[in-house]
Image: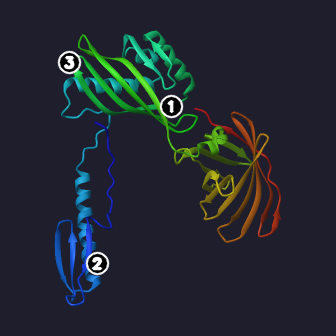
Amino acid sequence: MAQRKVNCVFWPVACSCLVWQCGDSIRNRFLFFGKAAIYVSEKYSSMRIFAFLALVAILASMTVCAIAQTAPTQPATEPSPADSPDLVAIRQTARDFETAFNSRDAAAIVQLWTPDGEFVDSTGQVFSGRKAIEDEHKKVFAGTGQHRIKVLIDSLRLLNDSAAIEDGRTILEPAPVGAPAIGFYTTVLIKVDGKWYLSTVRESRLETPSSYHRVADLEWLIGTWVAEEHGSKSTSVYSWVANKSFVQRNYSVSHPDQTTTSGIQLIGFNPQGNHLQSWNFSSDGGHAVGIWSPLDNGWSIEIQGTLADGQNTSATNLYTRLDENAYAWRSIARTVDGQSLPDTNEVVLKRQTK
């Protein structure tokens, strides 16, 4: 049974509601709630009427919340108490696939298929037989790094006592390179000698709305980067957020005097200015905005900011990509309240790999 996360919501108007005033000669009001009507004399002020409406809305929202909290929330691959033994066994196959994939065990994965099973990937390539399926998963594991998979079963039904069909989604974490998308699959399973096997698996991919194409050039930054300079150690973690429309950088710097500074930076596309832009927020309350311009092998960022004490700052930060696992950072043309500061030394940050 697919896991559901239900959020309680407050409805400003919990049901169909209408305040209706009769003609001047009557001077009375009716409150209509669905099919029910409540008479309210003119002696009751509008404020009391609205207070009554608010009370009804709150009670209705509390009822919705109470109902929602009683809804089942089982993980997609967990069996429901009402499942038949066959459905329980099929769900176990999904869990076995997750375990084998996350262990990068192509040999274990292929044992879930029938000997003449078929796998069709999202590009339409067909892999027939266990050997071809195993070889393909070995290639997948060679190119997916440390990605883990989660299988979410959306529907599962028995066609007869020896065949079933399963539809669901797969999620890779962290998100793979490329535009964001939802991975779907349809599986036909057959029962052989009392055991359920994958007979055919067909994958499909649906791209989701995103501004990824605007910020795709920053894909190489995703990961953890570290540097040490004059006793200070900096760590920057870049990750995709908001459906890969923005890159978020969490950074911290440990200083020789045991103090630490940290902050968050968001990088995305500004359609009004038609350029990449960053928004930086530091732990001491300072903030800054940067306009990004591409260079031959990196970026130049023109920064305007404000320190926590209110002083204005400016600088040009230079990012130079050295290779897949290293980039150089330098800050020049720095000012604080119009006073020039010296340029920083170049700092080389290296990708941290496990």
**Residue 298, above or below 14:** above
- Indicate which disc residue 123 carries: none
If the image is split into quadrants, where does the N terminus sit? Answer: top left
Of mark 1 and mark 2, the one earlier in the sequence is: 2
- Indicate which disc residue 147 carries: 1
Instruction: Please tell me how crowded label 1 is: few (under 14), some (14-19), or many (20+) other residues with Cα within 10 Å.
Output: some
Q: Residue at x 22, y 75 (%)?
A: 31
Q: Is residue 165 left or right of residue 109?
A: left
Q: Which residue is mark 2?
A: 50
Classify mark 3: helix, strand or loop: loop
The image shows residue 136 at horizontal and vertical percentages of 51, 17
**Residue 178, above or below 344:** above
Classify mark 1: helix, strand or loop: loop
Classify mark 2: helix, strand or loop: helix
Looking at the picture, which amino acid does disc 2 mark?
Phe
Instruction: Please tell me how crowded label 3 is: few (under 14), some (14-19), or many (20+) other residues with Cα within 10 Å.
Output: few
Q: Is residue 140 left or right of residue 252?
A: left
Looking at the picture, which amino acid does disc 3 mark?
Asp
Instruction: Please tell me how crowded label 2 is: few (under 14), some (14-19), or many (20+) other residues with Cα within 10 Å.
Output: few
Looking at the picture, tell me which residue is in the foreground, 8 or 280. 8
